[in-house]
Image (cartoon, coloured by chain):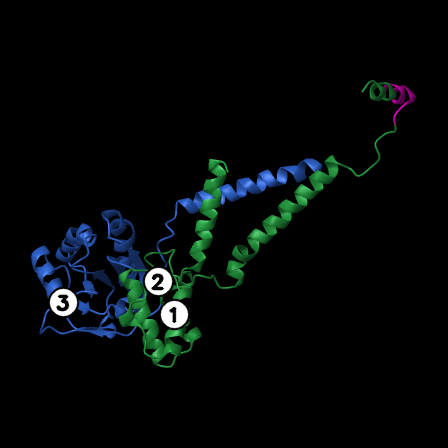
Chain colours: A green, B blue
Amino acid sequence: MRRPAFLALAALLFSFGGLGVPPANAVLPKEMLADPALEARAREIGQQLRCVVCQNQSVDDSDADIAHDFRIIIRQQLLKGESNAQVMAYMVARYGDFILLKPPFEWKTAALWFGPGIAFLLGGTLVFAYVRRRHPAGQTAPLTAEEERRLHQLVKED
Amino acid sequence: MKRLLFALPALLLVVVVVAFAFGLTRNPAIIPSTLIDKPLPAFSLPNVYEGKPGLRNTDFAGEPRILNVFASWCTACRIEHPLLLRLKGEGWPIYGLDWKDDPKDAVQWLERMGDPYVSAMNDKSGHTGIDLGVTGVPESYVIDRLGRVRYKQVGPISEDDWKNTLKPLLQKLAQET
């Protein structure tokens, strides 16, 4: 096959291949709790919290020192018997809603949640109306006798 | 009427562009403090100097103070350090929180660079910093006479920050009852 197509296919297969690899994270063995159920909850929480230094990464994924501290605190809280929601609330109390990777669903964030949908509907409506105007589903005018004869002539010449 | 309808997307675009242009002037990396107008979180930490008394959150009362979060390993802290030393000379009450640091290193650093603090406490684990919502160093908090956080400065304090924001705020808080 031609080179650009080959490269595109290779890139696609390569990226799909990546899905089979277990996700990497920055959780160190010495941080992990002995109880697998608690550790699983800690990982769940860590994946939902934003690292405040490397702000596009979760606390679980970030190698930053403060992410390590957050992971320790999460586990300390879980060992105290706090629920997942309580641990998340503990962190939000200190750093605000921005620390949640998924913004909370409140009237404050309504624009964030509904914005794309509304923009899509608005744009879609306008596009639909525009297309309908340009191509009305109607009859074209029938051919006159003169046009009919000319058409006949042209077709015969073929 | 049809004209208006077709002008609508262009109008929306202008609104969105203006909003984004304004947004570009702001720094998204700075997380606003959740502690504004709230009392300091509870803490009781040892002094960086061995033998000297530690600090508690309840000690922050009676006068407006600055709580400066620093560390011996923090390079950006050196930017504001001369200013802090000058402010100490002028009599402003600045307290230090030595964050995620060995107190011995902090003492060495303060002895070498000068100590601008009335008192500096050591938060070795960094957990008190997390209670304060610290994301890095340096950061500074303005605490009022009742021990409430009134302002948080992220990053080193510049001359402008002092002159235009922190100094007027401290003066205003001194007048509060």
The span picked out in magenta is: A143-150
Q: What residue did someone put label 2 on?
A: A25
Secondary element under disc 2, as helix, strand or loop, is loop
Give the CA distance from mark 1 to mark 3: 32 Å
Question: Tag 3: residue type?
Answer: Pro
What residue do we see at 29% from left, 70% from top? A29
- Return the chain for callout 3: B
Q: What residue did someone put label 3 on?
A: B103
Label 2 close to label 1 by CB (< 8 Å): yes
**Residue B58 in sight from this viewpoint:** yes
Q: Are marks 2 and 1 on the same chain?
A: yes
2 or 3: mark nearer the eye: 2
- Which residue is nearer to you in this view: B6 or A39? A39
Q: Is residue A87 above or below residue B100?
A: below
What main secondary structure does the magenta stretch of the protein show? Answer: helix
What residue do we see at 7% from left, 57% from top? B112
Q: Position of residue A55 (x, y in %)?
A: 36, 56
Q: What residue did someone put label 1 on?
A: A43
Q: Is A108 left or right of A158, judged from the image as shown?
A: left
Q: Is A135 left or right of B113, judged from the image as shown?
A: right
Label 2 close to label 3 by CB (< 8 Å): no
Q: Is residue A25 above or below residue B12?
A: below
